[in-house]
Image (tube, rainbow, N blue to C red):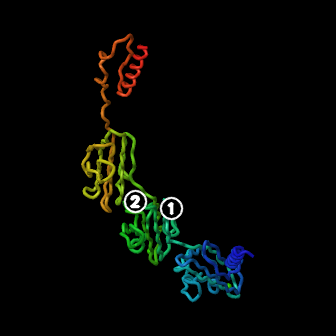
Amino acid sequence: MPKSLLLVMVQLLMTLSVTLAGQGYSTACPGGQIKSPNYPHNYDDNLNLHWTLTAPTDQRIILNFTKLPALECCCDFLKIYAGSTADHEPIATYCSDKEETLIASPGNALFVTFSSDETVSDSGFSATYFCLDCNKYLTNPTGDISSPLYPDNYINDASCSWLIEVPEGNQILLTFVRLELECDSDKVQVYDGKDDGADLIVDLCTYPSENALLSSSNTLYVTFTSDSSTTYPGFLATYTEYTCGDVLTDSSGSFTSPNYPGNYYSNLNCEWTIRVQENCVVLLNVIYVDTECEWDELKAYDGSNSDCSLLGSFCDNYPQTVQSTSNTMYLTFNPDDSGVGRGFQVLYSTKCPTASPPVTNVYPKIGTYPKIGTHPKIGILPKIGSIVHKLIDFKKSLLFHKK
Ligand SMILES: [Ca+2]
Ligand SMILES: [Ca+2]
């Protein structure tokens, strides 16, 4: 028998043993169901069943009862232990002390026992379970992150992390959609790098007034932690790979700082290149600017990069106009990690030399031609090349006439 088929059969048997017989050992991923025999009809007497659910070491198990178990409370018991055997601490006993329908394993395993005595039964219980993996490495260009079970209340003792990484050279824009936590004990923290050793950008328990933040490079690390009591709906945030700036080649146009007219983001790394037709120059008109002077200035350079001479640096004084000496202007906007404003709006246009006047004084004097018969019409010839050709034609015609 092929190994893969054998594996499938073993898994199937394991699943059956968990859901039907109630004497099972199962990986809790991707999920399944446990229930009392005959559910929703009355269970049997003299039962002594157990289930072991395990997840990979860095994951947790969520057990969710469709409704509170219905048992003979004096004498039949459903118990849930904090590990893979009954040697671990019981975290729930139905129906004596538990009124919650959602159980989260403290570690990566749960042990569930169900026993009934020799008389009187009830409808029992049914629960679904699944693995909760709240440590994620995300590399898609966009995505969501949220607290476990969002939009339902998060779990206690959560310790989740998300590492977001996009291609080098790009930044990550993280935008909070909702954030509602138990302040002082539960929090979301965002670090500007690969792990919690990087600079802490924010530490939040309520929805922030600046709901979007930007990484300074291509990684962002987010953590969510909760203590052992009191939960709230938690948080939802979206992220997107972010590039700022453009190459502009139209003869005129405009652009603004990101998020304009809202405040720009800290840590931006923007560059614009304006390249217009050759022999023309770029006119830049800063029609509005409000940035943190000294730290967050918009800079315009006379050429294609920041090694070229600085034409202007703008933070609070507008309108202002600068002009390049060639057909290319380069602009940068690199705000630091604190203090923001509304940013800027600029217009640009192209200034070209006025059209050359009609070329004069390049014709040979008519008087120098030998006068013979009809003279070819020279007309107005704007270009010397064509004049030469016409002169050659003219000479040919003279030769022809001489024949
Ligand atoms: Ca009983
Ligand atoms: Ca809490």
At label 2, the amino acid type is Ala
Q: Is residue 394 above or below residue 86?
A: above
Mark 1, other Cα within 10 Å: few <14 / some 14–19 / many ≥20: few
Which of the pair 210/80 is nearer the observer?
210
Give percent across and percent down for residue 238: 47, 61
Is residue 31 found left or right of 360 in the rendered image?
A: right
> Which residue lies at the image location 59% right of the left edge and 86% below the top edge?
85
At label 1, the amino acid type is Asn
Give percent across and percent down for residue 92: 56, 82
> Which residue lies at the image location 27% right of the left edge and 58% below the top edge?
295
Instruction: Please tell me whether mark 1 sits on a helix, a strand or a loop.
Output: loop
Spatial separation of the CA atoms under disc 2 and disc 1: 19 Å
Is residue 357 found left or right of 187 in the rendered image?
A: left
Which of the pair 274/71 is nearer the observer?
274
Name which quarter of the figure residue 168 lies in. Answer: bottom left
**Are the residues tagged 2 and 1 within 8 Å (C-beta)?**
no
Disc 1 marks which residue? Answer: 140
Is residue 258 found left or right of 86 in the rendered image?
A: left
> Which residue lies at the image location 51% right of the left edge and 71% below the top edge?
134
Q: Is residue 236 above or below residue 80?
A: above
Name the disc covering residue 325, or none.
Answer: none
Give percent across and percent down for residue 197: 38, 73
Instruction: Please tell me whether mark 2 sits on a helix, a strand or a loop.
Output: strand
Disc 2 marks which residue? Answer: 212
Q: Quadrant of the N terminus?
A: bottom right
Give percent across and percent down for residue 252: 36, 40
Q: Is residue 279 above or below residue 111?
A: above
Taking the image in four quarters, ligand 2 sits in the one at bottom left
> Which residue lies at the image location 38% right of the left edge and 52% below the top edge?
245
In this rendering, the label closer to the viewer, 2 or 1: 1
Observer able to see residue 41: no
